[in-house]
Amino acid sequence: MTSHTDYNGRVKVGGGPQVRELAHLTITKVAVDEQMSNNAYLLRCSDTGDQVLIDAAAEPDTLLPLVGDGGLASVVTTHQHWDHHRALADVVAATGAEVVAGGPDADAITEQTGVEVGRRVGDGDTVAVGSCRLEVIRVTGHTPGSICLLYRDPEGHGHLFTGDSLFPGGVGNTFGDSAAFATLVDDVETKLFGALPDDTWFYPGHGDDSTLGAERPHLAEWRERGW
């Protein structure tokens, strides 16, 4: 495992997790499923030991050992697409964690997984990780109820979990739907880039991390190319 100083956000399926230790929160990133290479993030409050998982994407045999015997308060599913919740039923069955998702995506998640979404969230809501708080930011376009989660480190920069709404190099796929793309790029520009500073580190649903500052110069280019 890596320490805070050598964390770079690069993980591979089967290659083990990377761990970033902040003052009050530990972030463990792991990639699962060879086909889709989804990222899952286990957050642990250093003060209380409480844990939250972002996207039980696949491979419960990989995710549950990370959770260990410390329990799991909740699983946040960033959006309704199948590749982000294939392990949800198994993780919830093993831990009893509450399922949290964006309101407009909740019914689809339940239909696909058989797991009830216990808490439907939107803009302005928070998700507790012990004494830490994740702010919910709804970003519409990739799906109707996609959410991002922001942790404002009181002793450092922000940490933003973006699901499939924002990646290094562009916004998420809107599958040729120009109206959905316009909504997505508007929300990303306004709610993320327009509200948060350049040193905000973001963690996407697939692939490597980046910062808002590294991506900000390309916003107009993304809008122009239409994806």
Image: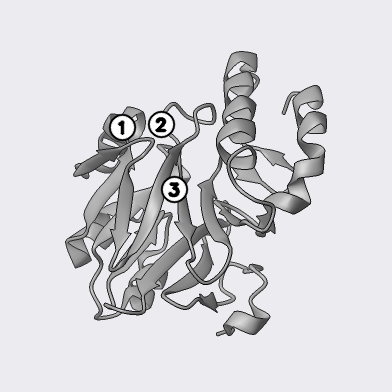
Which residue lies at the image location 25% right of the left edge and 67% below the top edge? 72
Q: Badge 2 local density, few (<14 within 10 Å), some, or many (20+)? A: many
- Rendering quarter of residue 113: top left
Which residue lies at the image location 75% right of the left edge and 47% below the top edge? 215
Residue 17 x/y as whole percent: 53, 75
Q: Badge 3 local density, few (<14 within 10 Å), some, or many (20+)? A: many
Badge number at residue 145: 2
Residue holding disc 1: 103
Front-lying residue, 224 or 190:
190
Q: CA distance from mark 2 to mark 1?
A: 6 Å
Left or right of residue 109: residue 137: right
The amino acid at mark 2 is Gly
The answer to which of marks 2 and 1 sits earlier in the sequence is 1
Residue 55 x/y as whole percent: 41, 54
- Rendering quarter of residue 80: top left
Badge number at residue 84: 3
